[in-house]
Amino acid sequence: MGSVYGQAFRISTFGESHGGGVGVVVDGCPPRLALDVAEIQKDLDRRRPGQSVLTTPRQEADRVEILSGVFEGRTLGTPIGLLVRNQDARPSAYEEMRDVYRPSHADFTTEAKYGIRNWQGGGRASARETIGRVAAGAIARKLLRTLAGIEVLAWVSRVQGIDSKVDPERVSLAQVEANDVRCPDAAAAEQMFALIDAVRRRGDSVGGVVECVARGVPAGLGEPVFDKLEADLAKALISLPAAKGFEIGSGFAGTALTGSEHNDPFVADPSGRTRTTSNRSGGIQGGISNGESILLRVAFKPTATVRIAQQTVNRAGEAVVLEAGGDTIRACCRARCRWSRRWSA
Amino acid sequence: MGSVYGQAFRISTFGESHGGGVGVVVDGCPPRLALDVAEIQKDLDRRRPGQSVLTTPRQEADRVEILSGVFEGRTLGTPIGLLVRNQDARPSAYEEMRDVYRPSHADFTTEAKYGIRNWQGGGRASARETIGRVAAGAIARKLLRTLAGIEVLAWVSRVQGIDSKVDPERVSLAQVEANDVRCPDAAAAEQMFALIDAVRRRGDSVGGVVECVARGVPAGLGEPVFDKLEADLAKALISLPAAKGFEIGSGFAGTALTGSEHNDPFVADPSGRTRTTSNRSGGIQGGISNGESILLRVAFKPTATVRIAQQTVNRAGEAVVLEAGGDTIRACCRARCRWSRRWSA
Amino acid sequence: MGSVYGQAFRISTFGESHGGGVGVVVDGCPPRLALDVAEIQKDLDRRRPGQSVLTTPRQEADRVEILSGVFEGRTLGTPIGLLVRNQDARPSAYEEMRDVYRPSHADFTTEAKYGIRNWQGGGRASARETIGRVAAGAIARKLLRTLAGIEVLAWVSRVQGIDSKVDPERVSLAQVEANDVRCPDAAAAEQMFALIDAVRRRGDSVGGVVECVARGVPAGLGEPVFDKLEADLAKALISLPAAKGFEIGSGFAGTALTGSEHNDPFVADPSGRTRTTSNRSGGIQGGISNGESILLRVAFKPTATVRIAQQTVNRAGEAVVLEAGGDTIRACCRARCRWSRRWSA
Amino acid sequence: MGSVYGQAFRISTFGESHGGGVGVVVDGCPPRLALDVAEIQKDLDRRRPGQSVLTTPRQEADRVEILSGVFEGRTLGTPIGLLVRNQDARPSAYEEMRDVYRPSHADFTTEAKYGIRNWQGGGRASARETIGRVAAGAIARKLLRTLAGIEVLAWVSRVQGIDSKVDPERVSLAQVEANDVRCPDAAAAEQMFALIDAVRRRGDSVGGVVECVARGVPAGLGEPVFDKLEADLAKALISLPAAKGFEIGSGFAGTALTGSEHNDPFVADPSGRTRTTSNRSGGIQGGISNGESILLRVAFKPTATVRIAQQTVNRAGEAVVLEAGGDTIRACCRARCRWSRRWSA
């Protein structure tokens, strides 16, 4: 369980990286929203790996099909079923993973929980799982824009030690799309590209921070005390593969300020609307949107898949060294090698 | 809505800072758990303000009463109703807040959402709301310890710029309780105390970071893909008043490492159990616990209540200056004073 | 678990028949609804036993207290906590029930499920549990009336073999309240009273059917396919103690008709609104309200508490005869007496 | 919303009668259950129309495909996606339904709620929606049988006035499958067949009662007070298309008995297990299973689709007569014809 998310707009995703396909059922999308498969496809194309030298070489068309819920170009108010077939199934490529736990992947925990695992890839823990999220997200984003004028935009804000300078109030999708890194600060993006490429060439990986803004959010959204707006955002974003940290507004940096420095002064704008002159709250106060832009950041750890030798164990508890490219090189008797020092100390 | 949380162990909290009382109904607590009101009271006593010079002066006994669900000292498996009466109601103390929005409090957003507000204090946005969480948490913690041997412990890890050194695998409740700051690093705690006290004396406030460990967690907990263990923890913790950031394991710092540095090598311990030699994953991989300690951190912004003059507006949209102690000093015509420069630029 | 109900208007009830008290937390009541404790008390007074010779002699004031969620006579949009203290705790009266399972009560199943039971009465299975429902229902009914002009009314339609004639489109609360049976057909009510009283005098009990109408319901309510309006009504009503059957519209009798007889013809009323000329659908078609009155019936089995000797067993599996008034008279060895014939056959 | 059902075993169905397809995502099926597509297909074949002269002539293969969640013949514990393509799309056959509301169908209420409707058939209100339920049900039934030894079986118990005699404790699937009516009482089935066929020939339809038994249910299932076992069953069954009534155990007939007649005496069976000598409770007491067979009945109204002239209106509010076979014959001005007498009275 755990593949259903949301209340009013409820999504139910399914699918492993290998097998028939991946997809989502969206329950609760309002009726009469104009919706074309091309709009969803566009976001899936953005998600698809293999678009630059930087990402995984997996090549898949990822064509989405609308199975239900849309009639004559408009939503019916009924569940919208979306399906993307898997095409690049190469079980043999993963044959060696059948019994070995890749470090910091979900191989071990999946077996610990379910006692079974689709070893032909990452299964449900594969980033391919996000296809369902992206497809449903394309609909959600259109809905927010159409019904409420809300615009949601995200970009790469940091890669390892390289930071960018981006104004969340003005950044545009075109700026995000201007380079392969998807960092709208061109100078930083160039450095990031060089870093990712260099690390990639030596078989390693890097992590980074993604920043997201929602502009045009009306005041009043969020359901205290448990379903505060930032709490629901935290859950949704931390549930993404590889996410390790979440910040709303000032985040961890805000703890360096005093209250008088941190508080956002209220002021009435010329139209009489209550606004704040700063936005350390990140657009949310007391769990409810205050009408300012919502600002959040998510930390993603470096990708666990590396082409560098790593120590691990197999299902039998035998020590195994994973070589570059994931090839297993040897198994040695357990509890004797240096990796076991921790336990013999 | 938004005051119900959890699936198997479901809590429903209620209560404003002023009014009859605050409390919680716990639905789903297993039957036959030995439970005494004193165990719950103990945690409420830890929560209660007024225990040191550092906290708010509000003095309340906060005596909890078990209304249902416990019979002859054991839980029945039925809902456990818990009630704490409000005692320190001083509406006059808040009279001036009736029409003024305190900066970075929930006054404005509450009115924007509900069109009504219990102005006699923070209402539902008051930290007093956490009484229900603490009371239910006392039961949850006992349950985890009794049924699964899981031990949960949290402490102040950082106050503004002062960091502490604490070993999450060994720290004890006694060490946490050793000082008023609740930081188990005695030297750091002393500095923190001095800082908090100094800031407090000049009417300001500070924020900080709380760290939490869960030890003895079995492998296999968590429900991918949306109800991953860290996602549920993120939601629960970010829903706390003043929480602005959440990290699991390596968190934001983990983005500075490469994949080969970040991955936690697997090894079999002498008993054959699969373990990791490092714990940058924070005890969770692919959304499922891996048997290592769960490590997380939460950033809390500095308390919004300060005794320093602040600019704000009232319900009529008039500029107002809140003086030390929260006293309103004057209202000036809107859109003319310097605070409005942002809008006239 | 199982004591939370509803989505937008979510209630969480608690409390056993004996112990501190019973009550409910209502989460999701809209803000700014005028609400007085007297309005809730009125419905609890209607529920309270001991109002006529026909009901259980338990005498309780059942005074309700609003703990939260209401401020200056209006709802805040926050959880409304409601508490009714238990007063009539006479554990000794139930002492003999400590180890004996009363037939068709929940004593046995409660122990089978939880392994523990508050034997001082029916515990959570007592009809006293409905106090939380009635209190929350008083708010729900006011909400429906105030916001949507919906009027909900229920009455006793049948007692054992005695049927009544009531026009659901015109019956009023005053007519329902006109007699102790709460059957608005005065002639039938008189017969029912005589029957109930006669059965009661010989220590036995009767069941019956309650009919309910909701008038003024707008078209469009209900969420197919699982949360169809009649499905949610069925769940809510069958969850009442002693409920054994549910009908919407034509119900079981509708199966005697052909399709052409059963279908409700559509017609436009003078204002152009689409109406039906009959209402065998009971106001719901395809799980969605059609604007006609919602009509439903619930069958309640005869009360399980009788003052007539009954065969049962105790926790040790020994045969026991419960005498009039619930007094245990003897235990005989198991698998030998005539009651065990079923098993020895 | 409303297309997600269940807690531990959660299903999310999708699909209109016309369009890409219908299906279901099952979230929460335990891992390592042997599952073959043929097992699901078998139940879909039972559901499929066109198997006898009695049902609708729609001919569809209804081949199910497993999209995810099953690996090497066993469930993974991840969501199981199931898809059945629509094949028999004949929009022209429904062209005339574009603007006309068929009596006692969901055409009107769907438009009232959503403002849009897939007029190429019943859309989401079509019985075709049950494909997702049947497919998920096939898995659920196997799960219950495999893990708990529970056997679930249903049959036609009554058609219009014709009742059957079936022993729910002994009836077998083979007996149910022995005739086209699926009534295991052969003599009654013959009468039912003749009745249905005769009614069908004159363009009309009949309703009836389906009875269901669950054998081998352990004591202790059900979650009072709202999620009582019978309440969840009532909701699930009343949510079926055309269901108008639900009974558990004695149901409505039970109201004719006194308490002393209705109560099920407890007795210990030779093994010491607590049993009842009668089963008017229908296997559930206080909302919790008591170990006896669960017995329930569901009333289905006569199918709304008839080939007999019927009065109705179109979207413009004009009176329309639907002829045999659903052909519209004429529209007359509104508020004038005899059908409107109700409003002019």
Image (tube, coloured by chain):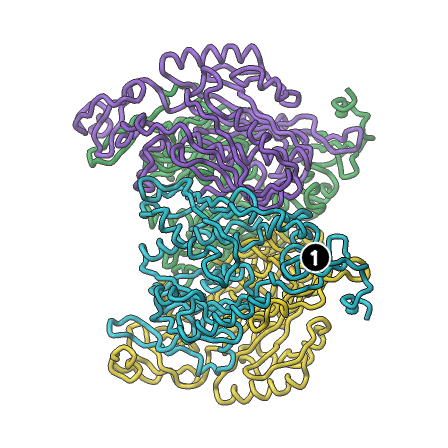
Chain colours: A purple, B green, C yellow, D cyan
Q: Residue B305: tell me if it is visible.
A: no
The amino acid pointed to by label 1 is: Thr
Q: Measured from the top left, where is residue D182 in percent x and y?
A: 43, 66
* B321 or A201: nearer the viewer: A201
Q: Which secondary structure lies at badge 1?
A: strand
Q: Measured from the top left, where is residue A39 in percent x and y?
A: 60, 30
* A50 or A326: nearer the viewer: A50
* D121 or C138: nearer the viewer: D121
- Residue for point 62% across, 30% down: A294
Chain for mark 1?
Answer: D
Q: Residues within 10 Å of mark 1 (few under 14, many from 20)?
A: some
Q: Is residue C333 left or right of residue D325?
A: left
Occupied quadrant, residue A92: top left
Q: Quadrant of the C terminus of chain A?
A: top left
- Residue for point 38% across, 50% down: B143
- Residue for point 69% across, 80% down: C178
Q: Measured from the top left, where is residue D127 in percent x and y?
A: 53, 55
Q: Quadrant of the N terminus of chain A?
A: top left
- State the residue position of label 1: D328
* C88 or D194: nearer the viewer: D194
Q: Is residue C118 above or below residue B64?
A: below
